[in-house]
Image (cartoon, grey):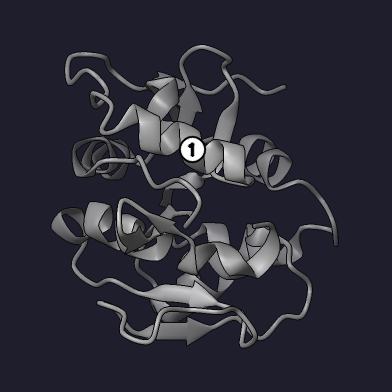
Amino acid sequence: MGGGGKATVTLRGRPLVEHALSALAPVVDELVVVAKRATPLPDALSAPVWEDEVEDHHPRHGIVRALRGAAGADVLVLAVDLPLMDAATLARLRDAGAVAREVESGRVQPLCGRYPARALALLEAAPPGEPLTRTVLDRLAPPLLDVPTPLLLNVNVPEDLARAEALGSPAPCEPSAPPSRSARP
């Protein structure tokens, strides 16, 4: 399931990409899928596809493509392999200008959060291969929003998919919890 084939993997009868789009739809003005040309996608999507032409599969390139296409607007990013994320939590990330942090482990998930338009120059200038978390935490220093671990279940292998099936729909993050500021690692 690794690489570009995740978008078409089915969870509860729907491709993973549609889970992401359904979660984002209520909280953004425009839905867009950013994908490499060779990425398998379902035949019918509920959003247009913007092609990421950079051959390297670093996720930073998809965010750069989204920011370029957004023409000066912020973007709310959700990776296709985070199918349990919900609209309420995405709205909190959007409103706080935050990136998600897993409650239990404290691990930052840079592919779930709001990227300000000013992030474009920083992401473009990052050295090749630099981890996205380093770029995000060191240079952007966004607020981090603590998110329940099940919402950030990353589906990478068949066992993750089975776990997502078993979890169903986890509870969203608590609305009373304020976002916390990131500490520089």
Q: 110 left or right of 88? A: right
Quarter that holds the N terminus = bottom right
Total marks drawn? 1
Q: 108 left or right of 175? A: right
Q: 67 left or right of 2? A: left
Quadrant hosting residue 169: top left
In this view, 182 is above or below 59: above
Query: Relative to the observer, which residue lies in front, 151 or 50?
Result: 151
Question: Which secondary structure, mark 1?
Answer: helix
**Which x, y percent locates residue 111?**
52, 48
Q: Residue furthest left?
A: 26
Q: Quick check: can you spot residue 113?
A: yes
Quarter that holds the C terminus = top right
Quadrant hosting residue 44: bottom left
Q: 8 left or right of 185? A: left
**Which x, y percent locates residue 33?**
41, 74
Residue at left offset 28%, top offset 17%: 178
Query: Relative to the observer, which residue lies in front, 13 or 137?
Result: 13
Residue at left offset 49%, top offset 26%: 101
**Which x, y percent locates residue 93?**
32, 39
Residue at left offset 72%, top offset 39%: 134
Q: Residue furthest right?
A: 128
The residue indicated by pointer 1 is 162
Q: Residues within 10 Å of mark 1 (few under 14, many from 20)?
A: few
Going by the numbered disc 1, the residue's amino acid type is: Ala
Query: Relative to the observer, which residue lies in front, 153 or 75?
Result: 153
**Which x, y percent locates residue 90?**
28, 43
Residue at left offset 77%, top offset 58%: 126
In this view, 134 is above or below 102: below
In this view, 165 is above or below 67: above
Query: Relative to the observer, which residue lies in front, 161 or 94?
Result: 161
